[in-house]
């Protein structure tokens, strides 16, 4: 199921988000609500187009072969800074869009990036505290989210995903997405 759903948006990103695909993506991922609604709403093609340009600028080019996680963090945070400026230029509230930018980033770099939102953030903070990666749940920030996620992936998720692949004879091409989705479910349901 995930493979078909995700493939649609990966192909759209590879092809410059043709037609209404960017709007459909933003709507599907519930990014057209709250403060972001003014930037992404159906009638604001300019806001969506400029958001797309920011994401393409930072996310399309190849990642380095070494120190991938710091490169991901820098690009992600730079895109968020540019979105801050975009929102200011368009006269909307100045807010961060860490979630929206991380989701867009994933569709450009699905092997390396993970999606960020409050659900997987909360679950990862609980895991980080439980395992001693961070002292307090509040110590997880957008600055260290990707680093802590990588630890979670290597230490806990990756072995479980490998066992599942053997059991079901199915392999999803983006295992970090599976780990991120598990965290999302744990966070949504208050588990872990």
Image (cartoon, helix red, strand yellow):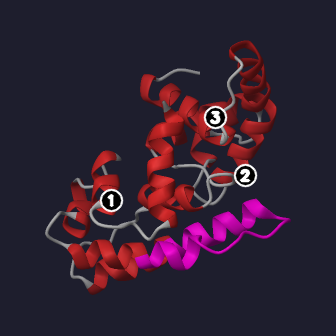
Residue 121 appears at what percent x and percent y? 53, 42
Which residues, given as a range, are shown in magenta?
A: 53-79
Residue 38 appears at what percent x and percent y? 19, 67
Q: Which residue is mark 3?
A: 179
Looking at the image, is 163 positioned above or below residue 176? above
- Which one is nearer the viewer's eye here, 99 or 103? 103
Q: Name the side, left or right, on which 164 lies relative to 21.
A: right
The residues tagged by marks 2 and 3 sit, at their Cα atoms, a distance apart of 14 Å
Q: Closer to us: mark 2 or mark 3?
A: 3
Magenta span dominant secondary structure: helix
| Residue positioned 22% across, 55% down in the render | 34
| Residue positioned 52% across, 20% down in the render | 191
| Residue positioned 63% across, 51% down in the render | 145
Label 2 SS: helix
Q: Name the side, left or right, on which 78 lies relative to 176.
A: left
| Residue positioned 25% across, 55% down in the render | 32
Q: Which mark is residue 147?
A: 2
Considering only order in the chain, which callout, 1 or 2, is on the residue closer to the N terminus?
1
Looking at the image, is 128 positioned above or below residue 116? above
Label 3 SS: helix
Answer with the quarter of the image where residue 123 lies.
Answer: top right
Q: Which residue is mark 1?
A: 21
Label 1 SS: helix
């Amino acid at each position: 199921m995930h493979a078909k759903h995700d493939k649609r948006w990966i192909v759209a990103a590879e092809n410059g988000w043709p037609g209404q695909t960017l709007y459909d993506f933003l709507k599907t991922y519930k990014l057209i609500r709250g403060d972001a609604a003014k930037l992404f709403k159906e009638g604001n093609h300019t806001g969506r187009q400029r958001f797309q340009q920011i994401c393409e600028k930072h996310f399309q080019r190849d990642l380095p072969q070494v120190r991938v996680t710091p490169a991901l963090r820098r690009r992600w945070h730079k895109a968020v800074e540019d979105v801050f400026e975009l929102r200011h230029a368009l006269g909307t509230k100045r807010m961060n869009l860490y979630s929206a930018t991380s989701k867009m980033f994933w569709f450009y770099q699905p092997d390396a990036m993970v999606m960020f939102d409050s659900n997987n953030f909360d679950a990862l903070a609980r895991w980080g505290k439980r395992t001693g990666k961070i002292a307090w749940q509040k110590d997880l920030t957008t600055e260290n989210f990707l680093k802590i996620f990588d630890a979670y992936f290597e230490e806990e998720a990756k072995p479980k995903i490998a066992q599942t692949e053997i059991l079901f004879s199915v392999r999803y091409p983006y295992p970090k997405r599976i780990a991120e989705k598990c965290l999302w479910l744990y966070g949504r349901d208050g588990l872990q």
